[in-house]
Image: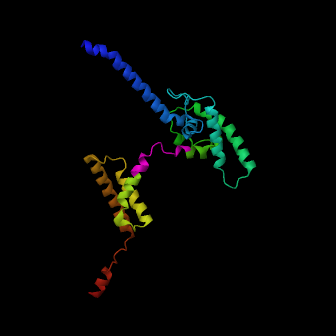
């Protein structure tokens, strides 16, 4: 017991060194997301809530927010039609700069739990200037897991034996596969029953729609009565 107590300060020091190295590693990995040219900070500036740029382990450098604002204005200009003149670009940039300050004040009064995907489409005329940028930034996926899962699912639909599958048919079958598997546990009986129920529902709906388009059999009762 005494031996372990004597080693405790050494172990504690090793743990502290490991924590410091881990923090430095995390900071080095995620530090680019907290620079002025970061799309993550651009999207965060368009989110509702107060003090949204206060981070515990990633303090922003001086001038970062001004750089983020300039990046948003650059995106506003880039999303204009290609045929826009320089005067139109300058005018839109000035309008967006004025609107961005007012919009940031309005968003600070909104609860940070409000969904920005619902808030921005319902925005007023002033916010509509920045709506194309907000739509672009909020459409960026935060993770590649969904994309990788989609490619994996597509591999079951299109394989070496189905290389001549038409693109439209591939899209239809892939949408059906995604509909059947979405939101279900792939490794449990509960998920299997949920997918089976969806498949039965889908087949029933398809069958009902197909029967509506089938030609109805002719009513030959009058012909039989006339014959006999």
Residue shown at 31%/16% (left/top)?
7
Q: Is residue 143 left or right of residue 54?
A: left
Residue 10, position as x, y percentages in the image: 35, 18
The reply to whether residue 76 is visible in this rendering is yes
Q: Residue furthest bottom?
A: 227
Name the one closer to the observer, 136 or 60: 60
Residue 150, position as x, y percentages in the image: 41, 52
Magenta region includes residue 143: yes
Residue shown at 41%/62% (left/top)?
170
Query: As displayed, is residue 99 above or below residue 201?
Result: above
Q: State which region is magenta.
A: 137-149
Residue shown at 71%/47% (left/top)?
89
The reply to whether residue 113 is visible in this rendering is no
Q: Is residue 135 left or right of residue 211?
A: right
Q: Residue furthest top?
A: 2
Residue shown at 64%/48% (left/top)?
78
Name the one closer to the observer, 24 or 167: 24
The quarter holding residue 39 reads: top right
Task: Classify the position of the C terminus by image quarter.
Answer: bottom left
Q: Residue furthest left?
A: 1
The quarter holding residue 153 reads: bottom left
């Amino acid at each position: 017991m005494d031996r372990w107590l004597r080693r405790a300060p050494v172990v504690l020091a090793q743990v502290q060194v490991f924590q410091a190295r881990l923090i430095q590693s995390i900071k080095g990995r995620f530090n680019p997301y907290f620079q002025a040219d970061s799309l993550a900070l651009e999207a965060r500036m368009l989110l509702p809530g107060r003090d949204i740029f206060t981070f515990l382990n990633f303090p922003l450098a001086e001038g970062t927010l001004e750089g983020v604002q300039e990046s948003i204005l650059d995106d506003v200009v880039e999303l204009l039609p290609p045929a826009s003149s320089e005067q139109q670009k300058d005018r839109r940039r000035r309008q967006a700069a004025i609107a961005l300050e007012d919009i940031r004040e309005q968003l600070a009064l909104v609860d940070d739990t409000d969904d920005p995907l619902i808030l921005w489409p319902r925005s007023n005329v002033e916010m509509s200037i920045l709506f194309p940028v907000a739509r672009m930034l909020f459409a960026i996926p935060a993770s590649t897991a969904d994309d990788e899962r989609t490619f994996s699912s597509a591999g079951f639909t299109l394989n070496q034996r189905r290389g001549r599958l038409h693109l439209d048919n591939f899209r239809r079958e892939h949408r059906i596969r995604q509909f059947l598997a979405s939101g279900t546990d792939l490794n449990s009986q509960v998920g299997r029953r949920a997918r089976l129920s969806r498949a039965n529902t889908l087949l029933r709906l398809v069958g009902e729609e197909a029967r509506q388009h089938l030609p109805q059999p002719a009513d030959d009762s009058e012909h039989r009565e006339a014959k006999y």
